[in-house]
Image: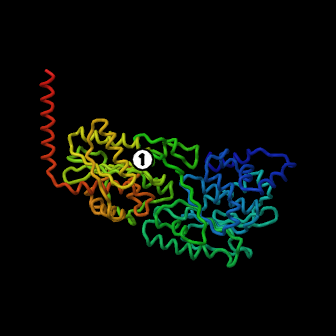
């Protein structure tokens, strides 16, 4: 039994409710989209609802379509937006509410659009309770691409098309299209080049936006999709003043300490609470660029960023020298990170690992001392850069005091910044883009900065790396010679210790 036959069996098996309740069912279905779905289409959705996006659409769809002629819904892949909006909401606005007479649904390909119309046709043919309650009957057209049907004595038309194609038969029985739904109008192929993107947007303006009758204040154009490119059709529509945009990413909140060794996934808040946090966290870690596009509606484009050519490494090698840059989050906004950049030098290359956390200063001091001890244990030179103004200077004193209490000397270099931060960060562009500085692939939040700067939400990681880079450029000594001396010193200390222990 195929999927269609299975669905038909389910529809025929729906429990019939006695006729005295028909009027109440119809009244409830007309009172709201959620009520209609619960009564007649629960075989397509799962209740209780666990998705914030779907809850919001159930709750606000009628109000949104009354107040806004044109709507854009950006939702993550797998959000069931096609089932909810293109299919069930079309049924609701035509057969149930009888507010839209000539509906058009457009997808990236005609094949996808036909599947949506097949879904609707099956309901109109097999959902006996719905058919009986609303008097659904076939009209003079019943094809894969177009149907005419009656709800009671009122005729309606639903037709489907593929994006970029000519839309025929716009005027039907004197009705111009009054419900136009564009469902995933783009695919990976037609966003590849600017010429393709321009062509699709020109088609959208000339074909879609001109479908409703001129001066009609009752139509709705609803665009639904996932953002595939930073210059995609959805991005261009979002910039229009005549569209209201609502965005629903899969991840509503990332862990505050995403760079920690074991992030707290209880802080990893998904749109749908029934989904596996571990599964999607692993997807995020394995392919951030794909994740941000498919699930977060924020595709990453290196074409418009300052750091378009960065390269990554897997494991920090044992380097000849190390430099740390510290950007404390003291006295700054709650959205800022406490950033520690560790820059290692080896064979003409610099290896940057940038940890960005949201921790109290005293906890960060412990982490910094622990990281410094790890470097000093390698018998490698280390320098630590901290800006000495306001809270940063106070933090420097706290760090130095705690280290001395533990019997540790930290070689702290005090920096006084006289140049604007933007210019200082721009100084990192050549060494990063030329792969003189390589980036630790596990520095996730920092990589987000690289992918989005200068439009990034924060720049704490870049600020700390710039300080480490600044002090790394100052000394000009022979690292191999220094390390040889350090090794001799270590051997001497070991010899004396062995001698005294005899």
Location of the N terminus by quadrant is: top right
Q: Is residue 123 visible?
A: yes
Q: State the image coordinates of residue 423 (x, y, percent, origin top left).
A: 33, 65
Q: State the image coordinates of residue 393 (x, y, percent, origin top left).
A: 35, 51
- Does residue 208 appear to the left or right of 498 in the view shown? right
- Does residue 14 appear to the left or right of 258 in the view shown? right
Q: Is residue 112 visible?
A: no
Q: Residue at x 68, y 56 (%)?
A: 88
Location of the C terminus by quadrant is: top left
- Does residue 441 appear to the left or right of 176 in the view shown? left
Q: Residue at x 76, y 51 (%)?
A: 128
336 over 308 or under it: above or below: above
Which residue is at the front of the view, 230 or 391?
A: 391
Which residue bears the numbered disc 1? Answer: 357
Count of numbered tags: 1
- Does residue 466 appear to the left or right of 120 in the view shown? left
Q: State the image coordinates of residue 240 (x, y, percent, origin top left).
A: 56, 71
Q: Residue at x 77, y 59 (%)?
A: 136
Circle 1 packing at 10 Å, graded few (<14), some (14-19), many (20+), is many
Residue at the extreme right: 20
Q: Residue at x 65, y 58 (%)?
A: 87
Which residue is at the front of the view, 48 or 93?
A: 48
Residue at the extreme top: 502
């Amino acid at each position: 039994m195929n999927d269609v036959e299975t669905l038909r069996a389910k529809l025929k098996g729906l429990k019939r409710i006695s006729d005295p309740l028909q009027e109440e069912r119809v009244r409830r279905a007309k009172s709201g989209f959620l009520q209609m779905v619960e009564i007649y289409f629960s075989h397509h959705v799962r209740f209780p609802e666990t998705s914030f996006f779907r809850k919001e659409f159930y709750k606000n769809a009628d109000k949104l379509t009354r107040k806004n002629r044109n709507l854009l819904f950006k939702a993550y892949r797998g959000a069931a937006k096609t089932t909810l909006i293109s299919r069930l909401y079309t049924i609701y606005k035509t057969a149930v509410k009888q507010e839209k007479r000539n509906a058009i649904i457009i997808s990236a390909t005609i094949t996808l659009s036909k599947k949506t119309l097949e879904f609707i046709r099956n309901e109109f043919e097999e959902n006996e309770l719905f058919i009986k309650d609303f008097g659904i009957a076939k009209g003079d057209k019943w094809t894969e691409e177009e149907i005419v049907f009656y709800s009671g004595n009122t005729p309606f038309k639903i037709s489907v098309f593929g994006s970029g194609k000519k839309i025929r038969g716009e005027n039907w029985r004197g009705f111009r299209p009054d419900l136009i739904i564009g469902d995933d109008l783009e695919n990976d192929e037609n966003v590849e080049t600017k010429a393709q993107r321009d062509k699709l947007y020109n088609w959208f303006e000339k074909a879609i936006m001109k479908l409703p009758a001129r001066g009609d204040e009752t139509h709705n154009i609803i665009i639904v999709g996932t953002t595939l490119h930073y210059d995609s059709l959805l991005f261009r529509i979002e910039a229009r003043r005549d569209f209201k945009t609502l965005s629903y990413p899969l991840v509503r909140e990332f862990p505050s300490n995403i760079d920690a060794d074991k992030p707290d996934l209880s802080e990893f808040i998904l749109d749908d609470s029934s989904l596996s946090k571990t599964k999607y966290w692993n997807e995020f870690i394995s392919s951030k660029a794909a994740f941000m596009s498919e699930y977060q509606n924020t595709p990453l484009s290196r074409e418009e960023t300052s750091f378009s050519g960065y390269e990554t490494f897997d494991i920090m090698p044992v380097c000849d020298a190390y430099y740390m840059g510290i950007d404390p989050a003291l006295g700054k906004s709650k959205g800022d990170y406490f950033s520690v950049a560790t820059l290692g030098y080896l064979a003409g290359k610099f290896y940057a690992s940038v940890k960005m956390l949201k921790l109290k200063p005293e906890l960060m001091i412990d982490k910094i001392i622990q990281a410094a001890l790890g470097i000093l244990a390698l018998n490698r030179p280390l320098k630590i850069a901290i800006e000495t103004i306001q809270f940063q200077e106070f933090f420097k004193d706290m760090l130095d005091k705690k280290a001395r209490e533990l019997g540790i000397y930290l070689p702290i270099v005090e920096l006084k910044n006289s140049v604007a931060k933007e210019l200082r960060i721009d100084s990192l562009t050549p060494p990063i883009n030329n792969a003189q500085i390589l980036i630790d692939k596990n520095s996730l939040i920092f990589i987000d900065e690289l992918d989005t700067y200068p439009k990034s939400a924060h720049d704490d990681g870049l600020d700390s790396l710039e300080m480490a880079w600044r002090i790394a450029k100052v000394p000009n000594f022979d690292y191999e010679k220094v390390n040889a001396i350090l090794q001799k010193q270590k051997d001497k200390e070991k010899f004396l210790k062995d001698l005294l222990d005899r």
